[in-house]
Image (spheres, rainbow, N blue to C red):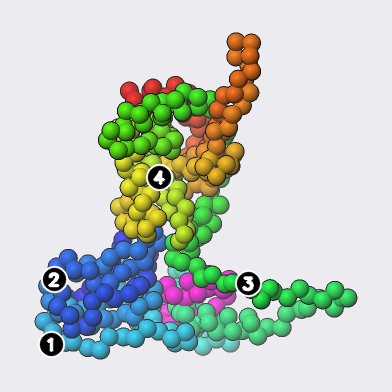
Amino acid sequence: MSEVVMPRLSDTMEEGELSRWLKNVGDAVHRGDILAEIETDKATMDLEAFEDGILEQQLVAPGTLVPIGQPLAIIGDGSGTAVPVEAPSASVPIESEAAELVEAPVAQPVAPAASAAPASAQHPIEGRLRTSPLARLVAREHDIELESVAGTGPQGRVVRADVEAAIARKSATPVARPVATAVAPVAAPADDEEIPLGNIRKVTARRLTESQAVPHFFLTSVVDVEKLIALRAEVNASLAVKGLKVSLNDLLVAAAAVALREHPDANSSWGGDRLLRHGHVNIGIAVATDAGLVVPVVTDADRLSLARIAQTTAALAAKARDGKLALADMSGGTFTISNLGMFGIDQFTAVINPPEAAILAVGAAIPVPVLRDGELVDVPKMKITLTADHRVLDGATAAAFLRSLTGILEQPLRILL
């Protein structure tokens, strides 16, 4: 008999949601079979079996948020088969004792003191605030400060029931209302629609909110892309027999890869107490999907041919649209490109994807009148804006990188060398 536990499926993952079971209690399973689907902070992943046997127990119901390492199921010889747990109701917390006790060291004893809360509800005097994963999730959704909630779990851990009680108290608290005026309040339109947030959109919102703590600065350059567009046309003509087509974004990825190789400081990340200068140039491409923003990664972009970059980006974009990106497709990025030029956006600033040091925002190529040989001619120009983490890059370093990238885009044969 062996336990199937919640695995760590990404470098930022602390917990995962068991979306649905694909095997039922009593089913025979073999090594490599998919037992369930797990939603992580990056994607929906498959939970594989690592041995043969019978699925005897399902310890977690679909929809449950489970910390890393907590048991999800038991595989054995069939003798311990049990009825699977049912999905939780909205009012009954299903956090198991194991979930409550994760990272819960024994608190030092404290002297008795007068308090309105029972002893079991006091936060330990030493160490950090202890909360369960579901408590943190519910608190975030309802804007509840966990520090203000008395915990009733082991060692004063705040559990979901504690947060729900705080929500109820908050709702019951009378709110001062403005003095009535002659203008009646506007009622919400009857045809308003509430759209539940998917996991990808929730994670994107949380990570981009975290990004606001990064000290950003912005640098913009105007690029003459006449030669770049001409090169694209020539390359596509030669690749037509192979059924391949290079996009402007592919050329941007290739050019950025060359510039990052020349400026390794820009290919770095913030490591808390150190800087991480990466040996691989892995470029993420921001892709908007119906489920939210995802960033698949072109790994080792500086070592790929332009044709190979085009093949890779096309495959990643298709998987992103179909919701089939795997963890490996979105891991390891060292730099990101966000291109809104196809929407007619002239210029914008993008938010850094932590822990990367920079992201490049790309606008549309727009004809600009230029005096050439005494005559006005239209030259396609494009604005690119680098957002940089000031903890990792200073202004001069970032400017040197952007200058090199601009030069490569204006003399694009360097991409092919």
Q: In which quarter of the image is the N terminus?
A: bottom left
Picture layout, residue 74 above or below residue 250: below
Q: Specify the amino acid type for callout 1.
A: Ser
User: In the image, what residue occupies the spot 23% across and 76% down?
Assistant: 23
Q: In which quarter of the image is residue 314?
A: top left
Percent coordinates x, y for residue 46 in the rendering: 28, 65
Label 4: which residue?
Answer: 284
Picture layout, residue 360 above or below residue 413: below
Instruction: Please report the bounds of the magenta region as a residue range.
Output: 132-155
Measured Cα–Cα span from mark 4 to mark 1 = 48 Å
Percent coordinates x, y for residue 338 in the rendering: 48, 44
Percent coordinates x, y for residue 245 in the rendering: 36, 37
Q: Specify the amino acid type for callout 3.
A: Asp
Measured Cα–Cα span from mark 4 to mark 2 = 35 Å
Q: Residue 30 carries which label?
A: 2
Q: Specify the amino acid type for callout 2.
A: His
Measured Cα–Cα span from mark 3 to mark 2 = 48 Å
Q: Is residue 7 magenta?
A: no
Q: Which of marks 4 and 3 is in front?
A: 3
Residue 275 in sight in this render: no
